[in-house]
Amino acid sequence: MNAVLAPEPMIFVDLETSGANFANDRIIEVGLIEVDENGAQEWSVLVNPETPLSPFISGLTGIDDAMLCSAPTFRQLAPALLDRLRGRLLIAHNARFDYGFLKSEFARLGVDFRAPSLCTVKLSRKLFPEHHRHNLDTLMTRHGLSLSGDRHRALADARVLWELWQCWHRQLPAATIQGAVASIVGRPELPPQIDAALIDDLPEAAGAYAFYGKDGRLLLSRRSSNLRQQVLAHFTPDKRDTALIRDTRKIGWRDAAGEFGARLREIELARSAPEIGPAVASHGLQRHAAANGLCSWQLRQYGQGDFRPQLVFAEDIDFALADDLFGLYPTRREAQRSLRTLADAHRLCHRQLGLEETAAGEACAAFRQKNCRGVCIGKETAMLHSARLMSALAKFKVKVWPYQGPVVLIERDEFGMREDLHLVDRWRLLGTLNSEEALQARLADGPSCNRFDPDIYRLIHKVLQTGKLRVRPCPAFSL
């Protein structure tokens, strides 16, 4: 085999599956072409998914239940398949799909499958940026390739990828292709203190990641739409000698279906560290650091039409159930500073708001500075002052939970391969599940005793406002 075509052991992979969801669907056919210095060898096999196929999948692939009933299961095939994949660069069209399914199938067997992978969609985009479409049918037409077998059968599609690889090497210099491959596969040199397996483990998925130093101290926490790309970007030659990389001993991450899940994972990662270091780059984490003093203003009635703010603390009342809360503050001092700013902006009385003490009938400091309409000395009624206060506070109101019971926020990735079911009740996240069975099991456990979390509240409120995720109401928990 020409060393230009096979600079390292490679394997062109195509899978047919029972659907597009890693968590619920299964592999039904594997097609491989192994390429190395000894040449190219083909291998394909049907896989019994141990579940009936949908008519759509049977119509798309031509594979039906009768063909699969006598086929081996993935468990039976796993040792031979793992032996073929090990030590090779995995090449697939939309490699995230094939690699993700292989990793999920092996994970069900307790096998931690890892392999460097190359996506031919991304490679085509880099080699031919003047074109906008890079699906397999388009590439076959563009490069004059013919199909040897049936489309949407694993081995036939794997053959197309091998033919495409050879075609590109006839059209372009080998150095151009090797440079593009290197930029996609992303194999930067890692510092000796960081496990080299990180390169193969990082998924091309949304989520959050964290850099940890000695004793688990958190150095950095961020979210990303592509974990692999953003984490490895920290290890480019120009960044390798930074204090962050020198101090990092471990990198952790949690993947997600999309932006909402990534934000949740960022909060979880940031809070899982035993110590918060000065280099942390996470605003959510900084808010949580003072969350033990979480407080809010609550309107209390002192007389007919006379409402005044009183500071209440999450340690004393459940903010998820309380009504008439305005603003969420990490400390008493921050709450008072915010109320004072509001008072000055709306000419509210400092004494009436409890920001200063004066004798009955004595003007407050704001009135003496001509920034209070005089409720403190009887020039404005308490009812009118209360109305102006409520109007000023309105935009800070903590929203009341708008559903009768819990809801599921359904989030899918852009390829439709992953679906996260975020179970939420009264602004509390009860969990993120990946199947209907897991969701029902969690619902059966009953409501959460978690405390109200201001960051989680803000995230959920925002996603409900924007309507970006589908909301599925669930029956109320029985108390």
Image: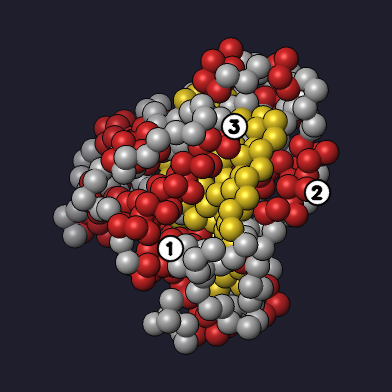
Left or right: where does residue 51 sit relative to residue 464?
right
Looking at this rendering, what residue extends furthest in the right direction? 76
Q: Position of residue 467 (x, y in %)?
A: 39, 29
**Front-most of residues 333 and 443:** 443
Mark 2 lies on a secondary structure that is helix
At label 2, which amino acid type do we have?
Pro
Mark 1 to mark 3: distance in Å? 25 Å
Is any atom of residue 285 visible in this view? Answer: no
Residue found at the very far top of the displayed protein:
55
Q: In the rendered image of this protein, does residue 54 appear above or below residue 338? A: above
Tell me, yes or no, if residue 346 can be seen here. yes
Residue for point 45% across, 67% down = 4
Q: Is residue 239 above or below residue 318?
A: below
Which residue in the protein does label 3 denote?
16
Residue holding disc 2: 79
Which of the labelled discs sits on residue 181, or is there none?
1
Label 1: which secondary element: helix
Q: How far apart in space, not on screen, are marks 1 and 2 (Cα)?
A: 29 Å
Q: Between marks 3 and 2, how big is the CA–CA gap?
A: 19 Å
